[in-house]
């Protein structure tokens, strides 16, 4: 066979390496976040024994996501997607590593723990935003359709949550939550190395084109406002942000207070929290793969609403009824299956309506917006459990999720969901071809829009 026929295959392989490396980096960093999601609430409950204290820790974990989301998109644009991803991973790993080190030295007070959780949460949104907005360019470089790449990215996120939560459960069971945090820090280190070595920076011409966009990005505030304005005048983006913002309050309540307290008090095994999250993530992984294969053909308002209700309501209802542990795990897996279709639907639609030069700002604003209610949810859950008990709080979460999840059936903003999906399947994505490789406390039950958050 001639050399001319042999060259395209290695070249195609080289063009796929950056996208694969990006997904691998997300697997490591998000897997580390999943470990922290399990470990941090258990550490707080071990130190204090108070659901309200866990709710306070949830505030310190989620408020930074609002701040980081507000300014992260503009900072990512200013310093570059690749550099921002690397810096965020290194800094997040350092804050996570500090927790077990201070504990070993006998210096980890509750206040110090809250401060480190806050710093870690502040650094997550810029890194997550950078990885999110890198994906369309690298997908085009690899010759991968955007809808398929979005489904693969969601599958990576689900896998990271499943592996990270399961690993955290095992580490908590056989060692301690502090040992689990050491694995978390290692995940961030590997993520930073993968992006540094295998993902190339955008060419200057591409960066100049973005800077030329009329977004009033002369300051972080102006860039954030530009993202908010775009969301406000785009019905689909506005509807998605509203829905996810409200349901994220419930997700934050579940992840920071309701599920940790349920695992500790009802199941009598703190390590069960990791397996609960892992079962949901395993179902979500299967749901993402199923959606990527066939589900995208029929996605629309009805499917979106059905998946939202099934993803959020049954787990809280099952816990309120105190079903057997095996049944609870099965319910979580089935709910995860429904949740797995949500992020690809949202991501594909948003990539179709958000222009390339606006993506970092818009997705940063979305990250901030959908995280805005999470501190309220975390604190409200701590107060509710202390005041009314765990079962009423769980039942209330189930009812609220059912009402909110069904809202796309009546809100007209979601009419554009299927249309945006169809546009994304044919819309070209601008990309610079190169030959070489170019919410810790927030990651609640659902992957948020910019990453994240099922």
Image: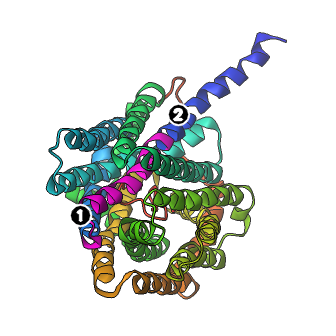
Task: Decide whether the magenta segment is chiefly helix, strand or loop.
Answer: helix
Magenta run includes residue 288: no
Mark 2 to mark 1 CA distance (whole Å): 41 Å
Q: Earlier in the sequence, mark 2 or mark 1?
A: 2
Q: Are marks 2 and 1 in contact (CB under 8 Å)?
A: no
Q: Is residue 8 left or right of residue 104?
A: right
Between 214 and 124, which is closer to the camera in this rendering? 124
Position of residue 125 relative to residue 63, above or below, is: above
Which residue lies at the image location 36% right of the left edge and 70% below the top edge? 257
Q: Is residue 166 left or right of residue 379?
A: right
Q: Is residue 255 left or right of residue 52?
A: right
For the N terminus, the image quarter is top right
Name, please, the residue furthest toward the right. Answer: 1
Query: How far across and down, in percent of the image, does residue 182 sit?
Result: 36, 39
Q: Is residue 389 left or right of residue 98?
A: right
Q: Does residue 212 appear in this view?
A: no
**Which range of residues does the magenta coloring cover?**
27-52
Q: Which residue is mark 1?
A: 48
Position of residue 127 relative to residue 65, above or below, is: above
Mark seen at residue 21: 2
Which residue lies at the image location 61% right of the left edge and 50% below the top edge? 146
Magenta run includes residue 35: yes
Mark seen at residue 360: none
Name, please, the residue furthest toward the front. Answer: 268
């Amino acid at each position: 066979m001639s050399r001319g026929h042999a060259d395209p295959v290695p070249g195609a392989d080289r063009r796929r390496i950056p996208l694969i490396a990006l997904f691998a980096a997300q697997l490591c960093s998000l897997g580390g976040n999943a470990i922290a999601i399990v470990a941090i609430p258990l550490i707080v409950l071990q130190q204090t024994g108070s659901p309200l204290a866990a709710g306070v820790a949830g505030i310190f974990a989620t408020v930074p996501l609002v701040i980081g989301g507000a300014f992260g998109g503009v900072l990512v644009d200013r310093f570059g997607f690749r550099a921002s991803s690397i810096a965020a991973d290194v800094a997040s790993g350092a804050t996570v590593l500090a927790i077990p080190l201070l504990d070993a030295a006998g210096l980890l007070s509750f206040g110090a723990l809250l401060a480190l959780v806050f710093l870690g949460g502040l650094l997550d949104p810029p890194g997550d935003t950078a990885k999110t907005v890198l994906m369309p360019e690298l997908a085009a470089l690899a010759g991968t359709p955007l809808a398929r790449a979005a489904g693969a990215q969601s599958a990576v996120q689900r896998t990271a949550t499943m592996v990270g939560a399961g690993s955290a459960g095992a580490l908590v069971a056989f060692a301690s939550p502090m040992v689990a945090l050491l694995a978390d820090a290692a995940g961030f280190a590997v993520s930073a190395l993968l992006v540094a070595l295998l993902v190339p920076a955008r060419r200057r011409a591409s960066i100049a084109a973005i800077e030329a966009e009329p977004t009033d990005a002369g300051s972080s505030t102006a860039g954030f406002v530009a993202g908010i304005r775009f969301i406000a005048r785009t019905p689909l983006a506005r509807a998605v942000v509203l829905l996810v913002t409200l349901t994220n309050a419930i997700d934050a309540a579940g992840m920071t207070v309701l599920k940790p307290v349920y695992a500790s008090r009802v199941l009598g095994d703190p390590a069960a929290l990791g397996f609960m999250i892992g079962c949901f993530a395993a179902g979500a992984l299967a749901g993402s793969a199923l959606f990527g294969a066939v589900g995208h053909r029929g996605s629309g308002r009805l499917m979106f609403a059905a998946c939202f209700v099934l993803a959020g309501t049954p787990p809280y209802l099952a816990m309120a009824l105190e079903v057997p542990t095996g049944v609870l795990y099965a319910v979580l897996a089935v709910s995860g299956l429904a949740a797995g279709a949500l992020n690809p639907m949202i991501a594909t639609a948003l990539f179709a309506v958000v222009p390339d030069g606006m993506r970092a700002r818009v997705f940063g604003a979305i990250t901030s917006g959908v995280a805005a209610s999470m501190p309220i949810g975390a604190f409200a859950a701590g107060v509710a459990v202390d005041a009314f008990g765990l079962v009423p709080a769980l039942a209330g979460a189930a009812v609220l999720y059912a009402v909110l999840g069904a809202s796309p059936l009546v809100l007209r903003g979601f009419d554009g969901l299927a249309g945006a999906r169809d546009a994304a399947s044919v819309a070209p994505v601008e990309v610079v071809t190169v030959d070489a490789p170019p919410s810790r406390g927030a990651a609640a039950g659902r992957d948020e829009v910019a990453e994240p958050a099922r």
